[in-house]
Image (cartoon, rainbow, N blue to C red):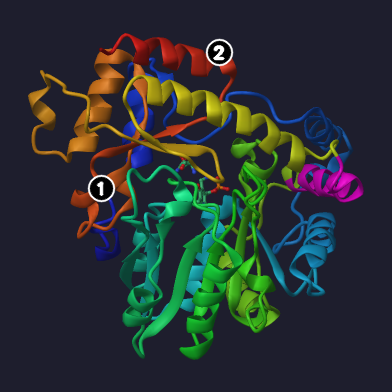
Amino acid sequence: HASRTDGVDKNVWVEFTQLAADYKAVNLGQGFPDFSPPKFIQEAFCKAVSGGPIMHQYTRAFGHPPLVRSLAKFFSRIVGHEIDPLEDILVTVGAYQALFCAFQALVNEGDEVIIVEPFFDCYQPMVKMAGGKAVYVPLRPKAASGAVLSSGDWVLSAEELASKFTPRTKAVVINTPNNPIGKVYKTEELQMIADLCIKHDALCISDEVYEWLTYDGAKHVKIASLPGMWERTITVGSAGKTFSATGWKVGWAISSGHIVKHMKTIHQNTVYHCATAAQEAVAQGFEREYEVFGSPESYFQQLPAMLHLKRNKLASCLESVGLQPIMPQGGYFMIADISSVKVDYNDQSSVDEPNDFRFVKWLTKEKGLAAIPVSAFYSPEHSKEFDKYIRFCFVKEDSTLDAAEDILRKFN
Ligand code: PMP
Ligand code: GLN
């Protein structure tokens, strides 16, 4: 086998999604809605597949023309830059492939990529497969008075980030709203990162798949919209997260044409293009959202309004059973501290594993509730410090959250 597969073979989603299925657990693990996407986009999909032969055949390699046009129209208004649909956008097989194309197209052997911890796990193997070296910088809980209760209390030190740059630094990867803690970066925080990227002539890969999901007045800001950043930022998005249709696997990267050009090279030589009908439906979805933007009919308002209630429901349940949550300002995950739960593990097969992995396996197998261990979102160097947290997903029917609550209440 090829050596590039070494060291990247373990995958938390493969392992824990299978475990949840094997034990038929109430699944607050992998992040996907257990309810249907909104009617308008389901109808758009049905219309696309019954719309004649062309919807069943190949479309443009770098993005179905109606979709890149809709994305350009929609996001030009938000980024404050006229996005060229044909030059500045690449439609991909989910955000995953947008990330993969970015690392493959931009990272050379020996280049360094700074990743903010905790991070969506795939950044690390993708950097490695591109021949790069991942360099980590943690968000640290502010050690101020008392307990840290909000993801907003997890901050990046400007000095620490600055110290990670070297002449080999190619890019910084950020994720806002963040998976798994739900941090939504403030403009000042993004400006600090932008200043360093500009100073060191580095790129910024900004994973914004949860861009519409913010709570309590937190506002999502695109780092690409800050002065001097359009030219050096690759913004990654996902229709799976945007329209609650993760199985469609439509994603995109938006950046300056001089960057997207190289990502297109990777894309045309790997998947060539993505499913036509799904792209057509997502295009219709963005057309609809463009018309209702900012109004209560907008799904980009309705989904966070619904999730806000689910977030609060899960948080009060976790608090009441002694699993102290960190309140997320965005996204659809919440991490909770498991330190106070004492467990008698029967399972000796997991004895060498990190505490949170052991706990989640026990919770899934013995209690029938699936979650995700948070140390999976850290580099091996730092995972030990964070193995007292597990992650729950709350983009679920209330009945699913109630079933989880029933299980948690029987704990003590
Ligand atoms: N980035 C983050 C932060 C995610 O949580 C996910 C999970 N879906 C992805 C990227 C991948 O998105 P997609 O399903 O569109 O490939
Ligand atoms: N992004 C989702 C999560 O964090 C799904 C990840 C995946 O399926 N690989 O749970």
Query: Which quadrant is the N terminus positioned in?
Result: bottom left
Q: Point out residue 295 in the picture as x, y percentages from the top left corner.
A: 87, 42
Q: Residue 376 carries which label?
A: none
Q: Mark 1 points at which residue?
A: 386
Q: Quadrant of the rendered structure where residue 230 is?
A: bottom right
Q: Is residue 316 above or below residue 289?
A: above
Q: In this view, does 405 lie to the left or right of 287?
A: left
Query: Which quadrant is the C terminus positioned in?
Result: top left
Q: In this view, does 368 lie to the left or right of 192?
A: left
Q: What residue type is labelled 1?
A: Phe
The residue at the point 66 percent across, 57 percent down is 273
Q: Point out residue 187 in the picture as x, y percentages from the top left corner.
A: 60, 67
Provide the residue span drawn in magenta. Answer: 279-295
The residue at the point 59 percent across, 74 percent down is 233
Callout 1 secondary element = helix
Q: In this view, does 134 lie above or below 399?
A: below
Q: Which amino acid does label 2 sit on?
A: Ser
Q: Nearer the viewer, mark 2 or mark 1?
A: 1
Q: In this view, does 253 lie to the left or right of 13?
A: right
**Magenta stretch, overall SS:** helix
Residue 291, magenta (yes or no): yes
The one nearer the camera, 382 or 155, is 155
The one nearer the camera, 247 or 352, is 352
How much space separates mark 2 and mark 1, taking CA atoms? 30 Å
